[in-house]
């Protein structure tokens, strides 16, 4: 089905394209607000909904929506299953072992992992320059960390040193990448040397819940000029607050969320996303969020 336009009247028609977020949980996601605002601003006849689903139901839902002319995103814990469900995937998706965006290309269901481009673009914005040559201290070794490693390697990062609670997982990530720019740290304080890194990246899930400890020895924050926290919460994260107090350049995962959403939008509609509109929609959604516990943190 071709992308049809309706001039923003808001009416759902027989030509309206459906986009879905598939995951479990999805209730705290900001993607519906961000994407629907972008569709509206661009006068595109599409609607974006969040659907909680099991891994068993994922392939049918993903393929059915795509083959009906729509598309969508996939979030935790189904990004690996989504890679297996598509007919073809981008190199970024294959290398990161995850699909977070799907759409129909000809008669084939295609997948990409726009977390990779989203992370790279957010990091470039934070560093106010290219990622090439960047030396990163990366906390975490799960799916988000893997997307960050792929992005850093592809953009010409100089060195990526991984620190993870479970060292074996960091070693497995290093080995999967097969690139000697990726190393594993032991976590001893002697390693927290000044001038060793251009940025500290938090790709653990610590910070998602109120009262979580910082994901790293606070001493590390005195050794880096910038912090990119992939976690986001309505009122920002403790890590970003601490880094900002110390005078570092720091961003939480909101900008990455917008950038990965922008890259998904481009896949679905074949045109550049209105990033400023998406940022505003995220800011409004964050202001409207209340309560405690897990708020945000899923794409
Ligand atoms: P995974 O479950 O795959 O990995 C979680 C990571 O966090 C692991 O490295 C794990 O360590 C570590 N971790 C969890 N709990 C603790 C703890 N108590 N102490 C120390 N380390 C801990 O999750 P993802 O990689 O998919 O996601 C991580 C975060 O990234 C999510 O919270 C999400 O908010 C964020 N994210 C943000 C995006 C954005 O657009 N801004 C996009 C994607 C993710 P171990 O290996 O030892 O278990």
Image (cartoon, rainbow, N blue to C red):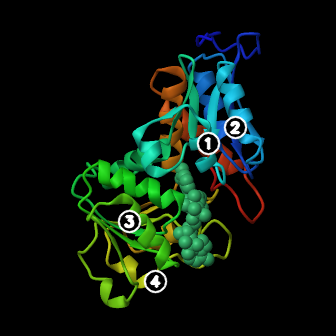
Front residue of this view, candidates 157 and 181: 181
Circle on res. 175: 3
Front residue of this view, candidates 214 and 61: 61
For marks 3 and 2 on the same chain, the one whose residue lies earlier in the sequence = 2
Q: Secondary structure at mark 4?
A: loop
Q: Secondary structure at mark 2?
A: helix
Circle on res. 82: 1
Q: Taking 196 as reference, is 299 above or below it?
A: above
Identity of the residue drawn at 47% across and 61% down:
145
Circle on res. 59: 2
For marks 1 and 4 on the same chain, the one whose residue lies earlier in the sequence = 1
Classify 10 Å Cα crowding around label 4: few (below 14), some (14-19), many (20 and above): few
Q: Secondary structure at mark 1?
A: helix
Is residue 173 in view? yes
Classify 10 Å Cα crowding around label 1: few (below 14), some (14-19), many (20 and above): many
Circle on res. 156: none
Q: Is residue 139 left or right of residue 19?
A: left
Residue receiving disc 4 = 217
| Comparing labels 4 and 3, the label whose residue is closer to the camera | 3
Q: Is residue 207 left or right of residue 227?
A: right
Q: Taking 257 as reference, is 47 above or below it?
A: above
Placement of the N terminus among the 4 image quadrants: top right
Identity of the residue drawn at 54% across and 38% down:
261
| Comparing labels 2 and 4, the label whose residue is closer to the camera | 2
For the residues labelled 1 and 3, the Cα–Cα distance comes to 23 Å
Asked whether disc 4 touches disc 3, contact meaning CB atoms under 8 Å apart, the reply is no
For the residues labelled 3 and 2, the Cα–Cα distance comes to 29 Å
For marks 1 and 3 on the same chain, the one whose residue lies earlier in the sequence = 1
For the residues labelled 1 and 4, the Cα–Cα distance comes to 35 Å
Q: Secondary structure at mark 3?
A: helix
Is residue 252 in view? no
């Amino acid at each position: 089905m071709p992308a049809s336009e309706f001039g923003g009247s808001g009416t759902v028609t027989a030509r309206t394209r459906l986009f879905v977020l598939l995951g479990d949980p999805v209730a705290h996601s900001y993607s519906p607000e961000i994407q629907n605002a972008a569709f509206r601003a661009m006068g595109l006849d599409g609607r974006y909904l969040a659907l909680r689903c099991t891994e068993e139901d994922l392939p049918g839902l993903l393929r059915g929506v795509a083959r009906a002319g729509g598309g969508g995103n996939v979030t935790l814990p189904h990004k690996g299953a989504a890679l297996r469900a598509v007919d073809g995937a981008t190199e970024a998706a294959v290398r990161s072992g995850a699909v977070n965006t799907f759409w129909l290309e000809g008669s084939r269901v295609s997948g990409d992992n726009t977390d990779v481009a989203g992370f790279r673009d957010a990091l470039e914005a934070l560093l106010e320059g290219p990622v090439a040559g960047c030396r990163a201290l990366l906390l975490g070794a799960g799916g988000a960390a893997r997307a960050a490693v792929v992005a850093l390697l592809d953009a010409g990062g100089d060195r990526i040193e991984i620190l993870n609670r479970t060292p074996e997982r960091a070693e497995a990530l290093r080995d999967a990448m097969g690139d000697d720019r990726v190393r594993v740290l032991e976590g001893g304080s002697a390693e927290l040397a000044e001038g060793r890194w251009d940025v500290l990246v938090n790709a653990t899930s610590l910070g998602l819940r109120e009262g979580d400890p910082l994901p790293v020895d606070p001493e590390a924050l005195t050794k880096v000029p910038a912090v990119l926290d992939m976690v986001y919460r309505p009122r920002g994260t403790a890590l970003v607050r601490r880094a900002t107090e110390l005078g570092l350049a720091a961003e939480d995962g909101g900008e990455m969320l917008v950038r990965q959403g922008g890259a998904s939008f481009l896949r679905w509609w074949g045109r550049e996303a209105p990033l400023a509109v998406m940022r505003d929609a995220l800011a409004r959604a964050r202001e409207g969020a209340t309560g405690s516990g897990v708020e945000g943190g899923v794409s």
